[in-house]
Amino acid sequence: MDPRTELKLHTGNRMPVMGVGTWQLTTDTADTIATALKLGYRMIDTSGDYGTQPGIADGISRGGVERADFYLVTKVEEVGDAYHATRKNLDELQLDYADLMLIHRPPRTGAGEDLWRSLIRAKEDGLTKDIGVSNYSIELIDRLIDATGEVPTVNQVEWSPFGHSDDLLRYAREKQIVIQAYSPLTRTKRLGDATLAEIAAKYGKSPAQVLIRWNLERGTVPVPKANQRQHLEENIDVFDFDISEDDVETLNGLNERYSSLGTLPYV
């Protein structure tokens, strides 16, 4: 496994096993993205409401990677016309298509069936290769599937050893839905945990690197944010070690449904 290793989605398309997140990455966005691409990152995660897409477009142009060789994830909001929002995102990114378009979060009521139908249309029109959801529970995903027959390729959720759901992971595996992990580093809030620090020391790695590797070991796809070169380098340096099964279980046992946002929306 390395940064360019890919997972096969249920549609037959492929996705890199990790990426770089861009939430709140509004300072030096272009330089960060260009640096990430040069370091070997091949997936960029953004959203229409992050304010980062114009900078990402600039970074892509500087990064020197052909369009077919990087994977772009972006999102539409839970209100408005998802098809129109898809086109707006692509205009900001200066791209002809996204690799993955997500509904950013469920609407206040319902599962967003009309949003989902609009993303299905966007996929059919070639604006995105795949579609998925973010912050969705099992119940809400089932409602989308029941309404349209279309199974999301991805559910992007906050996910770390301190906050995750075995039930959601089992469901995702049954449906062949990939779990993408945002805030896999707990927004630095739990990097000082004693158990995590002990495991990190055992492997000669940082706590952040262990959190990323834990995702890779479990088949979930981390998209850690970094806005400094040293953190980009640290986060991608996770392909030269394996966490033992016992240590993975120890990390699994840290689960307390922790969320840096207050609550996990999918449990």
Image (cartoon, rainbow, N blue to C red):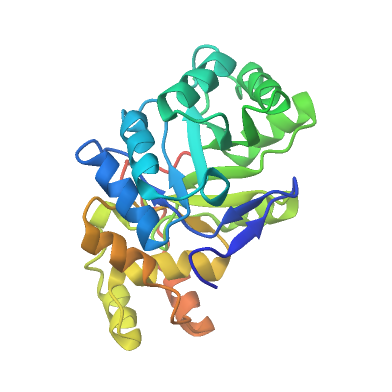
Using the image as rendered, state which of residue 111 and residue 20 is in the foreground. 20
- Residue 20 horizontal/vertical position (percent): 39, 51
Q: Quadrant of residue 186?
A: bottom left
Q: Is residue 224 above or below residue 45?
A: below
Q: Nearer the viewer, residue 149 or 9?
A: 9
Residue 178 falls left or right of residue 74: right
Q: Quick check: 108 above or below 153?
A: above
Q: Quarter-wise, where is residue 142 in the image?
A: top right
- The residue at the point 23 percent across, 59 percent down is 229
User: Which residue is farthest right?
Assistant: 149
Q: Residue furthest bottom?
A: 202
Residue appearing at x 46%, y 80% in the figure: 243
Q: In the rendered image, which quarter contains the N terminus?
A: bottom right
The answer to whether residue 93 is left or right of residue 69 is left
Residue occupying image coordinates x 25% and y 61%: 231
Give above or below for 72 relative to 205.
Answer: above
Query: Where, by quadrant of the figure, is residue 238 drawn?
Result: bottom left
Residue drawn at (46%, 38%), measured in percent from left and top?
A: 265
Can the viewer see residue 15?
Answer: yes
Picture mark count: 0
The percent position of residue 94, horizontal first and vertical second, equals 45, 28
Q: Is residue 104 visible?
A: no
**Is 136 above or below relative to 44?**
above
Instruction: Please state the horizontal and vertical placement of residue 123, each as a whole percent of the image.
Output: 68, 28
Q: Where is residue 239 in the image (x, y as percent from the top left)?
A: 45, 75
